[in-house]
Image (cartoon, grey):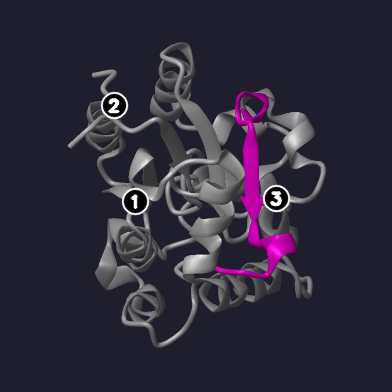
Amino acid sequence: MQSAQALVLDFGGVISRTLFETHNLTEQALGLAPGTLTWKGPFDLASDPLWQDMQADKLSERDYWMARTREVGHLVGETWDKMETFVQRARGADVQAVIRLEAVSTILLAKAAGKRLAILSNELDLFYGADFRNRLPLLNHFELVVDATYTHILKPDPRAYALVTDQLGLAAADCVFVDDQMRNILGGQKFGMQVVHFDVTQPEQSFEQVAHRLGIA
């Protein structure tokens, strides 16, 4: 298989650490006692039946996070009806604290090797707020951001992947697509992209696979 010419990344979970991994930061930011948040998604399936339901397609990823948003809002005595309220309050002003170092190094290596860079997200601005991109210089390295917050076309709809390839002017096979949700990976694969299913529990190994697909290992 030829090396990909473009790297297409999901944002949440791939570039940023998951909210499961940053419970301590969330508790500190919200003034909650350590250990208050016990749901851990893929890091401890037994702790999170709701996550299991999402993986079984009984509810969408957005429905999952909306339920967590309401739950955490209740813990701080507030009514939260928007997911961005949770993410922005939980992650505070220190955006860099939640970015994966492995993601940064892979992105910079890919750019130095002349690879095209794009983000394909279902909820980048929906979760993080429209001003988030201005607070994360790393995103300046990407020539394209396709965000379903505005397109309203969610992965794994094939039209979502087409928005990337059409704007990059590349064939699907020239792109390596990276996502932590298997349904989105299967969608990218069906569309014809090279894919890497990102394992949030093993980010270093996942980015090694990405580097291999790009020919920059």
Q: Position of residue 115 (x, y in %)?
A: 45, 24
Residue at (29% x, 18% y) in the render: 216
Taking the magenta stretch, the answer to whether it contains residue 160 is no
In depth, the one of 170 and 111 nearer the eye is 170
Q: Position of residue 38 (x, y in %)?
A: 42, 63
Residue type at mark 2: give it: Ala
Mark 3 or mark 2, whichever is nearer to me: 2
Residue type at mark 3: give it: Tyr
Residue receiving disc 3: 128
Q: Quadrant of residue 42?
A: bottom left
In depth, the one of 93 and 104 nearer the eye is 104
Residue type at mark 1: give it: Met
Residue 31 shows in the view? no
* Depicted 80 relative to depicted 148: above or below: below
Q: Quadrant of residue 4?
A: top left
Disc 3, disc 2: CB below 8 Å? no
Query: From the viewer's perspective, is 88 left or right of 3?
Result: right
Residue receiving disc 1: 193
The magenta span reads 139-154
> How far apart are labels 3 and 1 at the CA level?
27 Å
Q: Position of residue 78 (x, y in %)?
A: 78, 71
SS for tag 1?
A: loop
* Depicted 117 relative to depicted 172: above or below: above
